[in-house]
Image (spheres, rainbow, N blue to C red):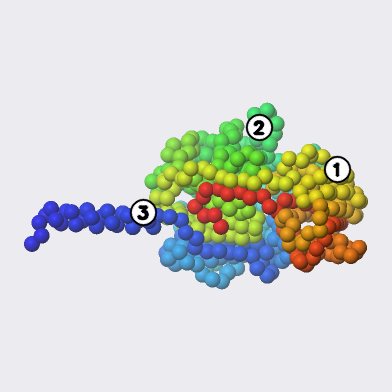
Amino acid sequence: MKSPFFCHMFWCMLSTAAMAVAAAEAVPHRCLELPPGEGNPRNSEGAFLALKDGRILYIYSRYNGKAGDDADPADLAARYSSDGGETWTQKDEIVVKNEGGMNVMSVSLLRLMDGRIAFFYLRTNTYYEELPYVRYSSDEGVTWTEPAPCVLEPNGYYVMNNDRAIQLQSGPFKGRIILPLARHALNSDEITVPEGKYPWDLPDNHWDILGVVTSAYSDDNGATWRMAKSVLAAFDDNGERVNAQEPGVVERKDGSLLMFFRSRDGQFFSTSNDGGDTWTAPVYTLHGPCAPCSMKRLPNGDLVAIWNDYDAVPEESRDQRRTPLSTAISTDDGKTWLHTKALEGNFHGCYCYTAIHVMEDSLLLGYCALNWLTHSRITKVPIAYLYTDGPEKRYDTTPGCYDKLPQGPFTTLEAVPGTWTVTSGAAEVISFTRGTGLHLQGGDNVTVELTLPKATRLADLPPMGLERYTKTPPYTVTVEAMKDGEWTAVCVHGDGVKTARQEPVKWSQPDMVTNKLRFRCTSAGGTIICDGNQKFFLVSYFKD
């Protein structure tokens, strides 16, 4: 018969081994990739919900058509998991087909206190009209009610990000549904929009591109909706108005509400003590690019925030890049943040619009991951991992070849990899959200030539990129190489190219040897010739 001391030691050893195994398993891992494909140029911004049969529902914006820009056609598609998010169904189930003038997007799913599921999404009709709508289900998503608007005001482009709707769980406003909203609008009902003009083409005093934040709420389980009294604009330390966009809300332990929203330098915070009807003046709190933050309460009562933490990024390399994707914990309802570390750190990634599904010991995160907003990913993160201290913040950067050039117009410019000369139209060196580059200004035919120091094989040139400057069509950039006294097209970018992302220059004849290149652009906004060789590495859990 074994002694009690032996049994005690045996169980201590077993417990220690079990904890070691648990610690080894307490790391994030990826569960689902949703890359774009033929006829499906973008998969983005989703939300999770636990169904009563134990499955997890994930609904996201599934774009169809050619480009996948925010206003392009999209449906709302569902995937399901029966094992806590580890694996997912392989085929999309279309839950809502495109019923907007442009699209439907940005899903929020909410289990109401009466047991129904509330399914919120945006219906985009024009560049000047976007409203949140809601459907309800009493049979776990098998059927849905007809859509109903949550905002009844005209003349408004109301944005509610994915995974934003909440229902208050305690206090005098228990049961109230809160929808955090940003609003862009024409500044007067009497302003008419010229045919073919987009909001960004209008004078600043016609369209409020900076936006304001507010909220809508319902005290009758979504039957009727009211708008909050407060409408907030944001200002920097110098009193200059800055953008106020894409708000979210969490309920604090004392019954107050914390609102967070994006601006050009990170996140502003505001609070409400009356259930979201009035809000305090916003205060700049979390450092980052103009990108959304997500926040949820954990089972132990702490808050988790997920955003692009710029404190890990050297100032000269930020450029509004939506990386890294970082996590942090607050034990005091958002006053201070601990255990900040990068989950995703690929410098060429774009990590944003994160949906958070809280389980007993893990989180499911659904977010845009790569290739701007086209590729989405579901990652499972153990809650224990959130409380580990991240590695020392380290990085390595290689400056871009245009970074130190004087900004402004030029006709001749010495830079890597040779001499740039404007032969038609106009060009300038500019700093933009993804770095510094050469902007071929708009016109019918803007042409810049690059003379190399010596004849070089195209494949041996430093990597280059092109970024479309505006969406306004038509758009064509042709890169030609001189050979035997004649120009030969070696790369062409056309109208299918998106704005706000760098497209690599891929040589159709990489073995061609030349000493001169010509970049010809036909576009109202022009294009930006970018440095494709800048390197950046962040210490993060995932790097690919």
Q: Which residue is mark 2?
A: 236
Closer-to-camera residue (218/405): 405
Left or right for 478, reference 164: right
Indicate the quadrant where residue 376 lies: bottom right
Residue 445 vertical placement versus 513 (above, below): above
Is label 2 in a helix, a strand or a loop? Answer: loop
Residue 106 vertical placement versus 187 (above, below): below
Q: Which residue is mark 3?
A: 23
Q: Earlier in the sequence, mark 3 or mark 2?
A: 3
Return the mark for residue 410: 1
Closer-to-camera residue (333/517): 517
Left or right for 386, reference 478: left
Residue at figure coordinates x 49%, y 45% from the top left: 341
Q: How many marks?
A: 3
Residue at figure coordinates x 73%, y 59% from the top left: 460
Q: Amino acid at mark 1?
A: Phe
| Few, some or many residues within 10 Å of mark 2 (<14, 14–19, 20+) | some
Q: Amino acid at mark 3?
A: Ala
